[in-house]
C-alpha cells in the first residue's frame, strides 16, 4: 500500500481524523471531559486542518501528525470554544485538566502536537512518512529542528523516534497528576533538520 502524506484534511475527512486522534490520545484527554462522546465532539470541533499532516492510502486516512505554530496546535480548544460546547463548570474543568498538557512555543523549532497511526497500519511506515513530512515542512519554513514529546507508556513510539534520529533534550514527570493522564514520565526529543 502506498502512503501519501498531505498537509491538512477536507471537511469530509474531519470525522475520521478526529476519531483517529481521539483513539490515540483518549487515555490522556478523557479526564477533561465527562464522556468519550463529549471528548470526541470537542476534538472534532477544535481540530485545525492547517496544523496537520495526514497520511492516506487507498483505504482512507491511516495517520495524522499535528503541530504547533504561532502558539496554536492541531487541537487547541480555547475556553471560549469549550464554553460554546459545554456548560460553564465543564468548560472550566476541561481547561484546568488540559492546561498541563500544553506544548511550549520555540521560535526556531517545529513542535509536533500528536502523532497517531491507525492500529492496522502500525509498522508499515506511516509514522516515518509523517515524521518526514514534518521534517520537510520545518526545513522549508527555515526552522532549525523538529521537537516532540513521548510518554513512558509508549516505548514503541520512542523507539521509532530514536531510529529516525530524534535525541532526548528534556523530560519530566507528571508527579501526582500521573493517574489523571495515564502516564508518569515523558521525554522531549529533537531532530535537527538540514537546510
Image (cartoon, helix red, strand yellow):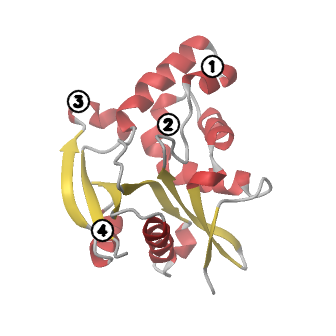
Q: How many labels does the image show?
A: 4
Residue assigned mark 2: 30
Marking on residue 176: 3
Q: Mark 1 points at which residue?
A: 83
Q: Judge depth for marks 3 and 4 and give the one in front.
A: 4
For label 1, the SS is helix
167 with respect to 91 (left or right): left
From mark 3 to mark 1, how far is it between C-alphas? 27 Å
Residue at 36% in and 49% down: 107
Question: Which residue is farthest bottom?
Answer: 1
Label 2, label 1: how many angstroms apart (C-alpha)? 17 Å
Q: Earlier in the sequence, mark 3 or mark 1?
A: 1
Q: Distance between the residues labelled 2 and 4?
A: 30 Å
What is the C-alpha distance between the residues marked 1 and 4? 37 Å
Image quarter hosting the N terminus: bottom right
Q: How far apart are marks 2 and 3 (CA)?
A: 17 Å
Question: Along the line of sight, which residue is nearer the eye, 92 or 70?
Answer: 70
Of the two numbered discs 1 and 4 on the same chain, state the one appearing first in sequence: 1
Q: Which of marks 2 and 1 is nearer the N terminus?
A: 2
102 to 82, vertically: above or below:
below
Asked if the residues shown at circle 1 and circle 4 are in contact, with their CB atoms under 8 angstroms apart, the answer is no
In front of the other: label 3 or label 1?
1
Local secondary structure at mark 2: helix
Q: What element carries label 4?
A: strand
Query: Which residue is identified by label 4?
Result: 191
Amino acid at each position: 500500500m502506498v502512503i501519501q502524506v498531505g498537509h491538512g484534511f477536507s471537511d469530509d475527512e474531519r470525522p475520521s481524523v478526529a476519531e483517529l486522534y481521539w483513539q490515540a490520545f483518549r487515555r490522556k484527554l478523557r479526564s477533561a471531559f465527562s464522556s468519550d462522546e463529549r471528548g470526541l465532539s470537542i476534538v472534532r470541533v477544535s481540530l485545525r486542518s492547517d496544523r496537520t499532516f495526514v497520511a492516506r492510502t487507498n483505504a482512507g486516512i491511516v495517520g495524522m501528525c499535528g503541530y504547533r505554530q504561532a502558539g496554536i496546535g492541531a487541537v487547541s480548544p480555547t475556553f471560549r470554544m469549550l464554553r460554546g460546547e459545554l456548560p460553564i463548570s465543564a468548560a472550566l474543568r476541561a481547561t484546568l485538566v488540559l492546561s498541563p498538557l500544553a506544548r511550549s512555543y520555540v521560535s526556531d523549532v517545529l513542535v509536533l502536537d500528536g502523532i497517531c497511526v491507525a492500529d492496522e497500519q502500525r509498522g508499515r511506515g506511516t509514522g516515518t512518512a509523517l515524521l518526514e513530512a514534518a521534517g520537510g515542512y520545518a526545513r522549508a519554513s527555515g526552522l532549525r529542528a523538529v521537537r516532540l514529546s513521548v510518554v513512558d507508556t509508549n516505548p514503541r513510539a520512542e523507539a521509532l523516534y530514536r531510529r529516525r534520529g530524534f535525541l532526548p533534550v528534556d523530560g519530566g514527570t507528571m508527579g501526582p497528576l500521573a493517574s489523571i493522564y495515564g502516564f508518569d514520565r515523558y521525554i522531549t526529543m529533537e531532530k535537527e533538520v538540514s537546510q
